[in-house]
Amino acid sequence: MVQQVTREQFDEFMVPVYAPAPFIPVRAEGSRLWDQQGNEYIDFAGGIAVNALGHAHPALREALAEQAAKLWHTGNGYTNEPILQLARQITEATFADKVFFCNSGAEANEAALKLARKYAHDQSDGDKSQIIAFNNAFHGRTLFTVSTGGQPAYSRDFAPLPPQIDHVTFNDLESVRAVMSEKTCAVIVEPIQGEGGVIPASPAFLQGLRTLCDQFNALLIFDEVQTGVGRTGDLYAYQHYGVVPDILTTAKALGGGFPIGAMLTTARIATHFTPGTHGTTYGGNALAGAVAGCAFSLINTPEMLAGVKHRHALFVAQLDELNHHLGLFRDIRGMGLLIGCELNEAHAGKAKLISQRAAQEGVMILIAGAGVVRFAPALNIPEEDIREGLSRLKRACEALIAEGAL
């Protein structure tokens, strides 16, 4: 018999790198979730933009069960059918010719940055190792990726950090131009800064980065870990902007809840990774390939992507109405079902307070810094769940206002 566990046991047994909610989820279906006590929640967090098809999607469950009965893992000394099929799906739908599979967004970004350095070293006799990244960016928590992320709170305790990484201002092309040179090997950018506040790049900014990278023979890396696989209403955000990167990283929604990441690139660039230059034990295993292949096929349809844009319009209209009554937000922004609400000056810094009270009212939301409430629900979330979830959020905010906390 399995012993009952409690939230307090997290503090007893787990390394304290997280501060999870006081309730423990035990079951979920679609966009609804239940805790140990049977309390129901509407999920606007989506496992941080991971559960693109909601919880326990029947097709994903079937794909997982079918593959689990055949082959799980062999290591990278062998390949397998599901991962090759997924690679074909991805390359047919994107600019990429080649794919490297791993287990997470951080691993995908680590691979991208290593490939950029390797490409530059192979191409240049001199020092061509500078990486340009952006303030308030987030690319993962490995030492390399946390160093390229532009949030000192995540990196300052791990010095000395890898050198030759310069941070400049997001959406400011002149700040890039001021530091870019023939020594630049890559620029890494999120088309929408997620952890940095759900801030979309301007089309002119991304196009300008493409032009500068071409001018200085540097690689343009798009971190689409959060924006990819339908999240913005296009399969990938680069397709919305019409700016094609040299390398793209993807994870989160790619597996529909099953851990998988990938780095996409062209055949020309991929040749600079040869056997032994990079790798991962679990990456590209058959279980991940089967589930991700199923998720990708369900998401990459005109109907699903159009549905994301429709739900965006409904979500924003409902948020506008909430804001009309309560006056909390100075800006509502984002694309598709990655939406951020920046709190106005009177309520600055209280995003976490709102998220905690929202959970008490039965709706799970995210934050993006201290001043932005973030939403990343399932791409197929029912419209009635959007309306009901935002009604619960409104009740939470009204309660905080009544208590004088907002």
Image (cartoon, rainbow, N blue to C red):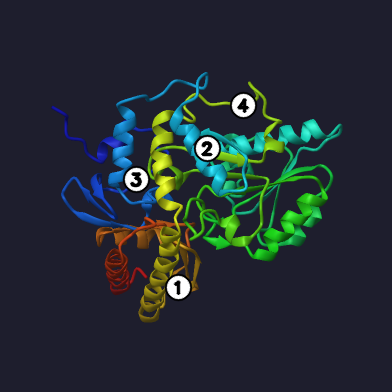
User: Which of the 4 image quarters holds residue 403?
Assistant: bottom left
Label 2, label 1: how far apart the Cα atoms are: 42 Å
| Disc 1 crowd, CA 10 A, few/some/many (<14, 14-19, 20+) | many
Residue 62 spot, x, y in % from top left: 29, 39
Front label number (4 vs 2): 2
Left/right of residue 372 with respect to residue 121 in the rendered view: left
Front label number (4 vs 1): 4
Left/right of residue 33 with respect to residue 268 in the rendered view: left
| Disc 4 crowd, CA 10 A, few/some/many (<14, 14-19, 20+) | few
Front in this rendered view, residue 43 or 294: 294
Question: Outermost residue, left direction?
Answer: 1
Disc count in the image?
4
Label 4 or label 2, whichever comes before in sequence order? 2
The label on residue 278 is 4
- Residue of label 3: 20
- Residue of label 2: 87
From this view, report whether residue 387 is shown above or below residue 11: below
Label 3 or label 4, whichever comes before in sequence order? 3
Q: Is residue 389 visible?
A: yes
Identified by mark 1, the residue type is Phe
Q: Are marks 3 and 1 in contact (CB under 8 Å)?
A: no
From this view, report whether residue 163 is shown above or below residue 374: above
- Residue of label 1: 329
Label 2 or label 3, whichever comes before in sequence order? 3
For mark 1, give the secondary structure: strand
Label 3, label 1: how far apart the Cα atoms are: 26 Å
The label on residue 172 is none
Identified by mark 3, the residue type is Pro
